[in-house]
Amino acid sequence: MPRCPRWRALCSDPDARFDASVDIDASTLEPMITYGTNPGMVMPLGGAIPRISGNAVYDKALGYMGFHGGEVMLGKPVDVVFIGSCTNGRLEDLKAAASI
């Protein structure tokens, strides 16, 4: 018989009260993609790389990746993939991703 994930055992008390509840319709979220070298350099998959002038970090990242401000990412071939996490990365997750 299949086992349930351990997190399913972490239930709130039936009479628990919360300060707020947030419902998100995930079907309205657009996939995101990075265009640079840090997690802050992200945009919707259908968007274009922002045009930013006078930012050395931005210029260096785009130079490294071979991109330019204003370029559309949709349809570009995937030549480089960074596997990692800036927070809460687990070795077993990285191993699973690297095995693909």
Image (tube, rainbow, N blue to C red):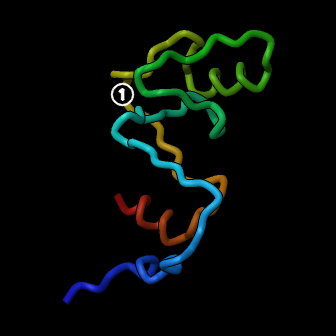
Q: Is residue 33 left or right of residue 60?
A: left
Q: Nearer the viewer, residue 30 or 25?
A: 25
Q: Quadrant of residue 99?
A: bottom left
Q: Residue at x 50, y 63 (%)?
A: 94
Q: Is residue 4 above or below residue 29?
A: below
Q: Is residue 36 above or below residue 56?
A: below
Q: Residue at x 65, y 58 (%)?
A: 19
Give the percent coordinates (x, y) of residue 50.
60, 15
Q: Is residue 16 left or right of residue 30?
A: right
Assign the N terminus to one quadrant of the image: bottom left
Q: Is residue 61 above or below residue 19?
A: above
Give the percent coordinates (x, y) of residue 30.
41, 32
- List the single residue furthest toward the left: 1
- Please name the amino acid that badge 1 sits on: Pro
Q: Residue at x 63, y 40 (%)?
A: 39
Assign the C terminus to one quadrant of the image: bottom left
Give the percent coordinates (x, y) of residue 4.
32, 81
Q: Residues within 10 Å of mark 1 (few under 14, many from 20)?
A: few
